[in-house]
Amino acid sequence: MSAAHDAPRAWRALQTARALLAAAFAIVLTIGAIRIAGFGVFDDFQQRVGAVVIASLVVLLAMPLFGERPRLRWLGLCVDAVLLGAILAAAVWYYRIAEELWGGLYSFTQTDVVVGCLGLAAVLELSRRAIGPPLFIVSVLALGYALGGEHLPSAVRHAGFQLESTVEVVWYSFNGVFGAPVAVVTAFILIFVLFGALLEAIGTGDALLRVAQRATARTRGGPAHAAIAASGLFGTLSGSTVANVVGTGVFTMPMIKRHGFSARFAGAVEAAASSGGQIMPPVMGAVAFIMAENLNVPYTDIVTAAAIPAILYYLTAFWMVHLEAGRKNLVGLPKDQCPNPWRAMRDDWYLMLPLAALVFMLFNGFTPMFAGMIGLVLTTVLI
């Protein structure tokens, strides 16, 4: 009996330890992002490989294979232990041969291929847990095409790649797992993700939602228009569709349904409005930073180019809601019942200071990294 009671207790203790370790590695990743934002890239190799390894450890510890399923959790723990060994072995081996590898004097061995395959398999599985099946499937198909494309019909056939050369490019170079997207994430995106999270923590998201609700109270669409406006405003600080849905959708979708729209329409409005957050300057999705890096243009050029399409996107969504509200004969609140949006802005203006400082610095010659760090400092002061 005591053994039966001790098993759940041991599992809970293990899960607590995993959560604490995941938090510790996440803090290390955050400190690294702040250090890079403040003082620049210290070593490109260490930055890329270290970020992938630490992020992999965070996912491995925070997302068990089978979750809390009683019959499978210990099996999942064994699989996670194998993945942990694979990612650590691959990282240690990579660091061991790095100097010779980048000096161009290294000849690949069978051990290099095996270790690289282990590291690649671990990263693929952890990306599946963190992001979902689509990226995993596309990556596996791409690798399968590289290794087996010589046996396909002539229209899509290629000359073929050996396993050694494929692993060399995908794992041991900066053209695969550790390519430009990882460098952009560590140099730019992490600091902006942290900036957006802290802005949400101090209540900026709620303040933007209040302004949007009060500004659209008289429109036919009412809460649906508020959802669009709030998502557009929230997108300026998050650059993430998921964060946008979580930050605004929880409040706006029930209100949209109460106003007279269908549940399906409420979900569609929130999904479309939140998706636009990725193209709403100044803090856009990861692709914006990758575009700036690959095109070798200032990030402010990307921001400027995205501004008009983003506004047109939200105006289109706003107009479609207006048409649907007209079809259903919905009306907004009478003028004497409408709250004053300027009062909301007057009450919460200080919450916008970090975002205003970010925009000012971006358009006055400061690097996105430094601007993000200053915005982060201002946000921390307001907490």
Image (cartoon, rainbow, N blue to C red):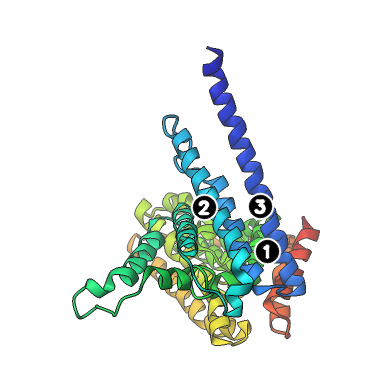
Residue at horizontal 66 percent and vertical 42 percent from the top: 20
Q: Can residue 186 be seen in this view?
A: no
Which residue type carries mark 1? Phe
Residue at horizontal 73 percent and vertical 60 percent from the top: 31
Residue 46 position by quadrant:
bottom right
Q: Which residue lies furthest to the right in this view?
A: 381
Q: Residue 96 carries which label?
A: none
In the displayed structure, does residue 98 sit left or right of residue 129? right
Q: Which of marks 2 and 1 is nearer the N terminus?
A: 2
Q: Residue 25 carries which label?
A: 3
Which residue type carries mark 3? Phe
Foreground: 311 or 297? 297
User: Which quadrant is home to the C terminus?
Assistant: bottom right
Q: Is residue 139 visible?
A: yes
Foreground: 339 or 180? 180
Residue 138: percent from left, percent from top: 36, 65
Instruction: Provide the secondary structure element on which disc 3 rests.
Output: helix
Q: Earlier in the sequence, mark 2 or mark 3?
A: 3
Q: Residue 195 carries which label?
A: 1
Tag 1: Cα neighbours inside 10 Å, few (<14), some, or many (≥20)?
many
The residue pinned by badge 2 equals: 86
Say above or below: 376 vs 59: below
Say above or below: 202 vs 374: above
Which residue type carries mark 2? Ala
Residue at horizontal 73 percent and vertical 65 percent from the top: 34
Foreground: 354 or 163? 163
